Amino acid sequence: MNSKEYIESGILELYVMGSLSATEKAEVEKIASELPEIAAEISIIETALMQHSSSKKPSDRVKQNILKEIQKDSTPIVQLNHNNTYKWLAAASVLLFVISTAISYTYYNSYKKTYNELAALQSEKDELAGNFNTVNNKYLKTNTALKIFRDTANKVIQLKGIGENPSAFVKVMWNSTSKEVCIDITSLPTLEADKQFQLWALADGKPIDAGVFDLNKDEIIRVKNINDAQAFAVTIEPKGGSINPTLSTMVVLGNI
Amino acid sequence: MLYKKKHIVSEDDLIALLKSKQANAMSILYDNYSTALFGVINRIIENDEAAEDILQETFIKIWKNFDQFDVSKGKLFTWMLNIARNLAIDATRSKNFSNTSKNQSIENIVHVVDKENSASTNTETIGLKKLVDGLDDEHQRIIDLMYFGGYSQSEVAKKLDIPLGTVKTRARNAILTLRKKFL
């Protein structure tokens, strides 16, 4: 039987209407899968029958009910007729990714630049603050010194170098009211690490300890209060000072 | 004409989507086949609302049993047609339907055709007349029994007392008439 005879036999019509036995049905299936003209004929018969029974449209509630009913048993919605939309979406998301990466990169660079600039400014600020502190300390010291020099209650005694140290020179400021004593070093010899200078007040021929000090020309050095004195002298003593002055190491001396 | 495939998705694609339980594939399936299946159900159960209930039941059954549908063993439409017909026929046999004059059993389908053969007019046959317009009685009956009634070839041959080959020839000619009208 050729395909024309097969089509004209009417077996395909019965196949579509579901009126064939299982054996006949399987045979039609086999032939339809081998011969496209048979498959095409089946589709035409199907369409004709579907049109024949399509005389009335069911109400919309049926579709709504069905979709509602099956919802709980379905996998998430996937768009069917919009393959192009997917392609566009994919392209758009790739583009978006590229753009956002570029923007991120730019922002990262400018962040890095800003961060470095900020760090530089920070260290500059710290340096300036440090400088300011140094200057401010110097200013405060100078101010203190100036106050002491200007104070009319202070007697200024010049202690001049003697013996091996003719160039040594120290000023002692002795406040007659408060009895405070300050020293301003102009020049003194350098000391070994285990030695210190010690100031003595000479009252009625007796030496009185007025405190020890190091070689510091940067500021006015405050030492012990002295009630009575006719002269001041500085000796070199072991670190921490001595009870009695070592006369052989006397550096400067000045009478009031 | 009401029948029109609204969505152009290949049958294979649609089947694949239904197998993976995509709800929107069901929406397409409904749009493409509901009117044709409703016509079949409505031919067995005249009451529109009752027929719509069966249509709903049909689609839900299609959804639930879709894993049982085997592409190698028949067309999608034929498989769904069978489900729709069986549910409709079962419904006419159930108690709820037995006393409702509006519903037609399969036997009634044949009777309606028979009545139409006689000259007496019947309100029940008006829709049918319109439906089968263009088919002569002989062809009308073949379509009624097979397409709407789900009768097998041998059952039809027996019922109409004609040879098996004649059943096929008449079915062929009946559908050729429909094709001339619709295609």
Image: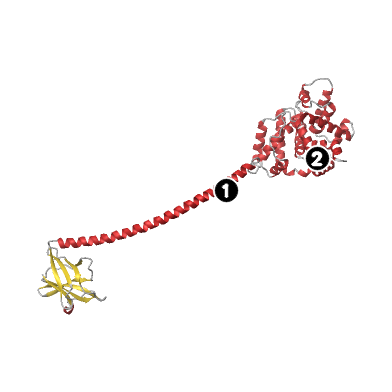
**Residue drawn 21% across and 76% down?**
A237
Earlier-in-chain disc, 2 versus 1: 2
What residue lies at 75% left-to-right and 39% top-to-bottom? B76
Q: Which residue is mark 1?
A: A94
Q: Chain of mark 2?
A: A
Q: Which mark is residue B71?
A: none
- Dot 1 amino acid type: Val
Q: Quadrant of residue A181?
A: bottom left
Q: Residue furthest top?
A: B120
Q: Is residue A228 above or below residue A23?
A: below
Q: Position of residue B142 (x, y in %)?
A: 83, 31
Q: Is B15 on the left or on the right of A247, as rendered?
A: right
The picture places residue A56, in percent across and down from the top left corner, at: 72, 28
Q: The disc labelled 2 sits on which kind of residue?
A: Glu
Place residue A79 in its image quadrant. Answer: top right
Percent x, y for residue A250?
17, 76
Under tag 1, what secondary structure?
Answer: helix
